[in-house]
Image (cartoon, grey):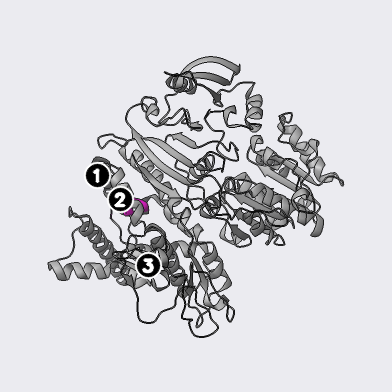
Amino acid sequence: MPNLVNVHFNSTTGSKNNDLGMRPMQAKVYEERNHQYILIKAPPASGKSRALMFVALDKLINQGLKKVIVAVPETAIGSSFKDTDLTTYGFYSDWTVEDKYNLCGIEFNDSVGTINTLISFLDDPKSQILVCTHATLRGAYKKITTNQLDSCVLAVDEFHHASASGDNQLGNLIDGVMNHSSAHVIAMTGSYFRGDTVPILLSQDEAKFQQVTYSYYEQLNSYQYLKSLGIGYHFYTGNYLTAIGEVLNPNKKTIIHIPNVNSRESTGDKYLEVEYIISKLGEEISRENSDIINVRLHNSDKVIKVANLVEDSKTRPEVLGYLRNIKHRDDMDIIIALGMAKEGFDWEYCEHALTIGYRSSMTEVIQIIGRATRDSEGKTHAQFTNLIAQPDAEDEEVQYSVNNMIKAITVSLLMEQVLAPAVNFKARSDLKPGEEVSGNTIIIDDVDSPLSPEAKKVLANQDNIQAKLLQDVKTMGRLMTNQTLPEVLLNVDLPKLIREESPNLSENEVETLAEVIFKQLVIQGNGGVVNEEDLPEDAEPYIPGLSVTVGETTGGEKGDAEPDKKFILLGNKFINIADLHVDLIKEINPFQNAFEILSKSVDEKMLKTLQDVVKGMKSTMRVEEAMALVERIAEFKAEHDRLPSISSVDDYESHLGEAVECLRKERQRQMSEENGV
C-alpha cells in the first residue's frame, strides 16, 4: 500500500546556533523565559531538553528561583538532562546535576529511596537541580505541602501524560501546584493532544500558559541530511507475523514495536513473537549479552545486531546503557520493543519505525514517528509503517476494526497538517504603521472590531483546534465517506470546538476564527502554497478586483512590486492566498489531497466496509449541523420536487435526509413544549 503521507523537505540552513549557542526553537523559547508558566510544543529531536536548561538556568540565576525539578516519564529519558556544557557555545552557565540528585541513574531503582531523596533535595539549601521520574514526583508530592515548591521551577517532560481527568495523578499535581503555590511550571511535549477525549489541562489552567510552538515542518525543513518522510498503513489478514516480512527490510535501521499482549493483534506470547521475527531476519549466531543478538541474514554473509527490549531480564539496564552510548551506525541495526523506545529514546540512525497494531493515540504515533526523524549523516529518508488488521465486512467485530482504522487514518491526516508549510494569520490591529509582513501571512481585517487577547491566543495556537477536530472519530468517519459537508465543518464543528477552547469569546470572534482555521485546513489539504515564480506557464490565476494582498504594508497605498505572492491550487485556478475568502472555499473538502491518496490506496471493499459501518452508526447529528444544511435541502427539493430521503442509497441525499429527520424531531420537541406536553 502506498504512503498516505509523503513529504519532502528543502533542507534549509535554519538550524544554525545563535550567539548564546541556541538553535532556532531554543531561542524562541528563551524569549518567553520570564513567564511563570511556559508550554513548549515541539517535535522530537528539536532540542526541548536543552531549551529547558537555558530557561531554567536563567530562572535560577536571574529570576530569583532556588531549585529546578525535572520530571520525565521513565528513567531511560533522564539521560537527556545529564550534565551539559553550554558555556563553550556562548551561554553564561553550564547545566550540572549532582550525582546524588540524578534519580534516573541505573543505581536508583528504589522508589521509596528516590521519593525521600527528592524531599531531602527540597530541604538542601546548596543543591539546585534534580532529575526524576513522574512516579517519583507524584510520590513525593503526597508527602509534602504544596508551598514547599514555592521557590521551585517544575519542568515536566512529555506533558501529555497529564490530563484534566480527576483520576490522573500528574494532572492533579499540576493543578495543585498552579493554584496553591508560586512555583514556575515549564511543560514540554512533542504533541499537545492525547488521542482520547480528555483534555490535558482545564481551559482556565491552559490559559495561564505562554505557549511556544515549533512545528514539525520548521524542524525537519532545517535538517542537513534528512530529505523526506513517508507514513504508510499496510493491512494484513490473519496473523501479523505472516505479513511482517513484507514490510521489514533488514538493511534499514529499524525500531519494531510489537503489540501489547492484551491487544487483539497479539498472539499472546511476546517472547515467541520476538523469536519468530528474528527467524524471519536470519540465523542467530551469538549473543553479546542475553538481549543483544548477532544475526546472520538469510542468503547473505552480513551479520546484524538486534536488541531485544521485550525480554524482562536482569540485563535490561545494561542493554539500555549500551543503546544510550551508541556512537556509530554499525553499533545497532534493529530494536524490538514493546512499551519502551517510544518517547525520548534517542537513536539518531533509526530510519524506519515499524509498529504492529492499531495505535488509537495520536500522541503515541507521533512520538513513535519521532524515533525515525532525527537528522543523521547518510539518512535521507525516514519511514513510519503501521501494520494493521484489515477489517472484514463479515467479521462480528467489524465496527471495532473500522473504528480503529478511522483513528489510524486520522493520524495520517493530522501529520499531513503538521508537516505542511505554515500559513500565518495576523490581526490588522496588531500591525504597526509601515510594518511589513511575510509572504506567507494573511491579514485578518479586525480594525472595526479588534480581536480580544483571548481570541488572538486561539489564533496563535490554532493547532489545538485542528487536533481536536481530527480526534473526533465520528466526524472523521463521515468525512471519509462523504457523509458530511465542508460547510458543516465551517459553521458547526469548528465553532463548537472554538467555544470549548475559549468559552468567553464573542460570536463574531468565534465566526472569524472558524473561517481562519478552515482556510488553513483548505490550504494545507490542497497541497500548500506555491510561490508566484513557480506557477506553471499555463496557470490561470484568480484575481478579484480589489483585495488585501500578501506582503502588503499598512503605511500607505499598496506598492507596485509584489515579489512574494503566494498561491494555492483550488479547482483549476491558482488563487492568491490573501484572496482566499470563505465564499470561494466553503464547498471544498479541507482534506482533499489526503482523501485522494486514501481512495487510491485503500481497496473498494475496505472503503465500502468503512462506509457501511459509519452509515450504520446511530445518528448523532446535532440541530446546529442540520440547520447548516437547510440551504442544501431547499436546493434538493427545488431540483427533485421532494425532500431528500434518509434511506436513499445515494450518500449525499441520505445525509440531507438525516438532517430533515433531525429538524422534524426538533420541531416536534418545540411544539410539545409550547403545548405543555
N-terminal of the pair, mark 2 or mark 1, is 1
Query: Mark 2 touching mark 3, by CB under 8 A?
Result: no
Mark 1 lies on a secondary structure that is helix
Percent position (x, y) of residue 516? 44, 68
Pick out the residue farthest to the right: 126
Q: Nearer the viewer, mark 2 or mark 3?
A: 3
Q: Judge by depth and name the residue closer to the eye, 397 or 351.
A: 351
> Magenta part of the protein: which range?
476-482
- Magenta stretch prevailing secondary structure: helix
Mark 2 lies on a secondary structure that is loop
Q: Nearer the viewer, mark 2 or mark 1?
A: 1
Name the quadrant containing residue 543.
bottom left
Q: Within the magenta stretch, is there residue 479?
A: yes
The residue to which callout 2 is attached is: 618
Q: Judge by depth and name the residue closer to the eye, 367 or 45.
A: 45
Name the quadrant containing residue 402.
top left
The residue to which callout 1 is attached is: 608
Mark 3 lies on a secondary structure that is helix
Query: Mark 1 touching mark 3, by CB under 8 A?
Result: no
